[in-house]
Image (cartoon, grey):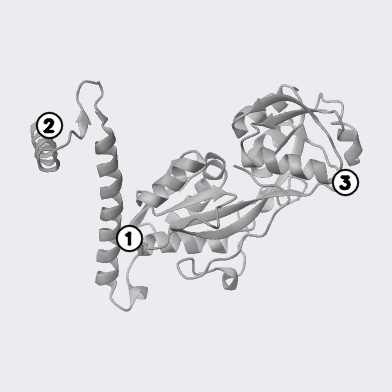
Amino acid sequence: MTQSAASQSVQHLEDFLSVQLIDRSKRPFVLTVEGQKFYDGLSGVLRQFDALVDEVRLGSDPTGDELTGHVLVGSIYSMGLSYIPILQEKFQAQNPAATFASQLAHPHEVYRMVEQGSVDFGMVSYPDQNHPSLLTTLWRHESMILVASPRHRLAGLGKIKPEVLNQVGLVAFMSNLRIRQEIDKELRNVGVTMRVVVELDNLDSVKHAAIVNSGVAFLPSLTVQNELTAGSLKVIQCEGLELTRPLGIIQRRDVSMSRAARSFLELMMKNRDWEQENPNSPDHDAHVKSVPSSSAETLSTKQEPVKQPSMAGG
């Protein structure tokens, strides 16, 4: 569309709704609160329309048609950076006519996107099973490891007992984050009191603080693979500490997803075992090890209960 045609269309919309959708006083233009609400709502409506068209065209026999359509996923940063690139590569290799994109955001934003229908589904840690409008499915439990700079005094001790961690400096997450609350609970369970040296609100900041030897840190193993390989971080093994956080998929209960979105979900459920999560495994450079297809779940009809893990992330 030309700029004038687009401006005229927006003006007609604003006249029809009797509200201003775009704040033209700012450069570049930004949506007003009403404009954002209208955009988010229409995104969900159009995604439902595309899914309906897809289903009607396929009829009762979808097996003979090439998979097309667009998949849009909302994800927390850690899952989006660790898992989505490999899953996307596998999905598009199998379905070259389909397209895929992801939006990375903080957990509350992922929930908002799913609730409003602006994404097909969301990927979050420690998913809320009691959400009134969302269906939650456990994807996998992700291992958490204790890491430190190779210059840290614990880095060369080998496997340690929990009491060695007493009063050791900890690079911690903010106290209002679920990941911090679960770490604190697990430390209490093994009778350990650590000394918090700094509180941070994201994985990257915690990882960087550990690298510069501010203290030890508990982090998802996949998020520190590059640092472990490069030698800027080392794993500290501690007896009795086997920490995980649950990763899950959230979707609206009252919305049918397109065939492309369902296909991506099926791919995720068939690929829940990641060899490179174990830095001591000889196969840790492998991308994804598929589990038998019989373990995959039909997400639109079945909800797997999330087991209580030792530790969860926000």
Of mark 2 and mark 3, the one earlier in the sequence is 2
Q: Decide: is 265 above or below 280.
A: below
Number of marks drawn: 3
Q: Amino acid at mark 2?
A: Gln
Q: Rate crowding at label 1 as few (under 14), some (14 to 19) or many (20 or more) other CA atoms within 10 Å.
A: some
Residues at marks 2 and 3, CA–CA distance in whole angstroms? 65 Å
Q: Residue at x 53, y 57 (%)?
A: 130
Q: Nearer the viewer, mark 1 or mark 2?
A: 2
Q: Residue at x 55, y 57 (%)?
A: 129
Judging by the rendered image, the residue that carries numbered circle 2 is 3
Residue that protrudes farthest toward the bottom in the picture: 60
Judging by the rendered image, the residue that carries numbered circle 3 is 239
Q: Decide: is 94 above or below 184.
A: below
Residue 74 or 178: which is nearer the viewer? Answer: 178
Q: Rate crowding at label 3 as few (under 14), some (14 to 19) or many (20 or more) other CA atoms within 10 Å.
A: few
Residues at marks 3 and 1, CA–CA distance in whole angstroms? 50 Å
Judging by the rendered image, the residue that carries numbered circle 1 is 68
Label 3 with label 1: CB-CB less than 8 Å: no
Q: Quadrant of the N terminus?
A: top left
Secondary structure at badge 3 equals: loop
Q: Nearer the viewer, mark 3 or mark 1?
A: 3
Of mark 1 and mark 2, the one earlier in the sequence is 2
Q: Is residue 68 left or right of residue 307?
A: left
Residue 111 x %, y %: 46, 47
Residue 110 x %, y %: 46, 45
Label 2 with label 3: CB-CB less than 8 Å: no
Q: Amino acid at mark 3?
A: Glu
Q: Decide: is 68 above or below 111.
A: below
Q: Rate crowding at label 2 as few (under 14), some (14 to 19) or many (20 or more) other CA atoms within 10 Å.
A: few
Secondary structure at badge 2 equals: helix
Q: Is residue 91 left or right of residue 275?
A: left
Q: Quadrant of the C terminus?
A: top right
